[in-house]
Image (tube, rainbow, N blue to C red):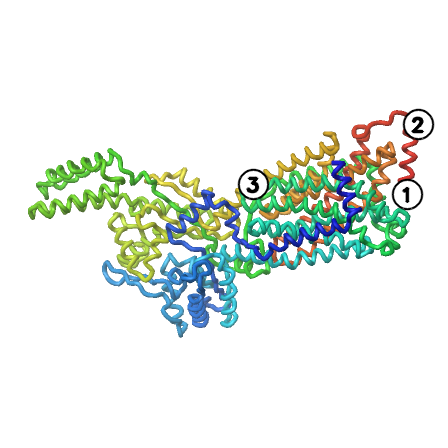
Amino acid sequence: MKTLKTALIDFSINHYRLATLVMVLFTIAMSLFFPLIQVDTDPENMLPKDDPQRVFHNLSKKEFMLSETVVVGIVNESDPDGVFNPETLGHVYELTQFAKTLRWPDESDPGKRSGVIEVDMLGPSLVDHMSQGGPGEIKFEWLMPRPPETLEAARAIRDKAFSNPLLKGRLFSEDGKVLCIYLPLTDKHLSYRINEELNKKIDSLGGKEAYHIAGVPVAEVAIGVEMFSQMGIGTPLAMAVIFSLMVLFFRKWRLVILPMIIAMFSVMSTMGLMIGLGFQVHILSSMIPIFLMCIGTVSSIHILSEFFDVYTDEKGRNETIRTVMNTLYVPILYTSLTTAAGFASLIFTPIPPAQIFGAFLSAGVMIAWLYTVIFVPAYVMMIPKHKLKDFGMSAVQRDKDSLLTKVLQAAGRITFNHPKGLLILVAILVGVVIWGTMQINVNDNYAKRFVGSHPIRQADIALNRHLEGTYTAYLVLQAPKEANSFTPDTVQAFSSDLMAYANSIQTQFNSAPSLAGGIVRHASKLSDRVQSREAFLDAMVKEVDRRAQAASDEDFYTYDELRTHIGVQKEKMKIFKRPEMLAYMAELQTYLEATGLVGKTTSVVDAVRKVNQEMIDGKPENYRIPEKLQGIAECYLQFQQGHRPNDLWHMVTPDYMQANIWVQLKSGDSSAMKSAVNAADAYFRENPPPFQLSHRWAGLHFINLVLQDKLIPAMLHSFMGSFAVVFVMMTFLFRSLRWGLLCMVPLTITILTIYGIIGISGKDYDLPVAVLGVLALGMAVDFAIHFLQRSRVYYSAAGSWKATYGSMFGEPARAISRNVLVIAIGFLPLLIGPIVPYKTMGIMLFAIMTLSGIITLLVLPSTLTTFENWFFKKPETKTTQQALEATGTAALDTSHR
């Protein structure tokens, strides 16, 4: 390591132009890859493509012909009739017609068009009103074939809408104040474009009603798009503030621009490298620049601070920067290594974008370190000597009496004079924050990633206040494949059943037992020719038909009766035509809605009950499930006579072996989704279904829960692993287990304090917090390394902590404090944007830097004061002790001047 240190420092000082050229050329080379950038804002891609839950989610969308949907909510709270007035319904009709046109050529397939799927759109003019057309008949007509011209006509539409439970709470609110248009999309990534086009149209409509555009796809895509947009605003603002603060501290813009160059070049090199290697820039990767801007300036500020404090005209640039680099090389190297190790641990998470984020952020940290080591000395050497006139602590006497210097000197005296009281106070505070960490609630909500005034957040609040929920998940019920499997027992069961039925009808059809016996004998010959139970029953039907064609008139009718019975047995295989199965689903839906977690559920049960009601007499008491399979089959058939026959296949598969319950949740919190999942699991455990059945969840709202359940624990495990790695590295750096433990104290207290405040304040522990927790690992240990490494060096010269602490609260403490102030205040501009994750980033960077700096400057010296004999070797003789104290006293006097 010493050889490498000497080589790098000598190269950067003696060949400063070449060192600069190498850095510039590499950065330019990496930047050439920028035009190849591919951006991926889809949070679903946080999961591997082969993740079982993601695979099932996509399979369910295919099986039930489901699409991601944009919800347009129209709210009218001023009109006594709510949205059911001629003006509002006219605007709704016009907006619906406009939404049908939101289709464009598909970029991935020029022969197709992408956008809104018109056939699956839902709106007042696009859904059926079901009513009785006569005995045993049902009539379908459009709910709103044209905009109403009178209030009476508008109220008539309201009354029709209220008569259909399938629409209530979903298409319109029960208080009549809200009405929705549902726009299924060919690709959810079009939701942002759809949102913009709809807003343009809405602006032209006027009216008293308010319009809100919501839906998980809108929030997911918008957060990705706006995070990239906000990055282009927040990062320059942050750097401008950092630049201004450094000018305030160091007064020479020629030197102050140095950390900016290193940070910018580090970002360009890292992002270019990632793009050049073919990786997409995901939402997580988009945060690499802001992280590197923070990390890339820290080491250079340490160097600048030391250079500022020790530079004199007599020493000159060469001697001063060489001394500074020799002093700070080891701390800077280890702080970079620990930070890189923290991020590199993300490579072992099961989340591909997190792996990419961790790998390239780790690489970026080391690139920033290399640029710092070779370019800072090179840049200093390129500054003409006369430009450094009146630069440095010796030239700026007032800095020695500045407010910062006075505060640091006072802090140093407190840590030396009252160390035990300070440690006791910190221990009490740690106990409080440990309690706070136990109150942490793990939860995520895409809508809450926008500030309260953002249109998406406003839409979420307004629509869920009136409707039964706009967050949809799908509870998929599946009959096992074994239900259709063919085994030797299948033939035996079929034979027994057919013969029993034949005997039961023998009084009407005398030849039934004998004819059934012939069919049974034929069945025994098919055991090696069919693959499924359904195929076997089809073969039996064909065999009956073949025999019936050659039979007498009397036997023909007997065969027809047997054929009907076999057909019924085949239909009974379709469990979602069975009355007992639909009754079970109805009870499940009632249970879920009664939990308070779910606003509304919709399934084929509701469609069957509504059709059955209208087929009988339209009275409320007949809104029920038919008692026989044939009655349910007739309801299915009648439903498909309407204008939207394919709606049935959104709720059940054509083989009637899978059913889909649409679950609407009023909250976008992942914790609400998790509670709904647990409630369903509990119901299935306590109330076994009448048939063998499995249940699984799908839908974006559920996928977000899956992502949370995978990513946040992975981040925590990664943090714990990297924590251990950093501890080992610290132990190796200091060649001491006790010094390694001491170095971890600021990090540990900082993390506990931040998480404790999160728990006490009630803020959710979400993805942004989990990611930023990893950042704290490198940042919080940075100051501890610098402080302890310099303490050991100063102590070896002074011989006692009493003679050392004054020097430590001179230049080392000033360097740490400047870093704290520059980074903590510098990233506060992130708070001005509309994106909550950036606000969280700004707050956490402020908290990490401030807390770790304060803890480093208070807890570490207090600990060293209290346990000096445990951490430092005692001097061998009294004379030596006195000599070393004299040396330290001189340093103390120097720092107080």
- Residue 709 in the image, given as x and y percentages of width and height: 53, 42
Q: Is residue 505 left or right of residue 102?
A: left
Q: Amino acid at mark 1?
A: Thr
Describe the element under mark 1 as helix, strand or loop. helix
Q: Dot 3 surroundings within 10 Å: few (below 14), some, or many (20 or more)? A: many
Label 1 vs 3, first from the N-terminus: 3
Residue in the image at 60% along x and 54% along y: 33
Q: In this rendered view, identify the residue nearer to me: 667 or 335.
A: 335
Q: Dot 1 surroundings within 10 Å: few (below 14), some, or many (20 or more)? A: few
Q: CA distance from mark 1 to mark 2?
A: 23 Å
Describe the element under mark 2 as helix, strand or loop. helix
Label 2 vs 3, first from the N-terminus: 3
- Asked if disc 1 and disc 2 are in contact, CB closer than 8 Å, the reply is no
Q: Amino acid at mark 3?
A: Thr
Q: CA distance from mark 2 to mark 3?
A: 57 Å
Q: Amino acid at mark 2?
A: Thr
- Residue 23 in the image, given as x and y percentages of width and height: 70, 50
Q: In this rendered view, identify the residue nearer to me: 729 or 869.
A: 729
According to the picture, the residue beneath numbered tag 1 turns out to be 894
Camera sees residue 182: no
According to the picture, the residue beneath numbered tag 2 turns out to be 879
- Residue 382 in the image, given as x and y percentages of width and height: 80, 53
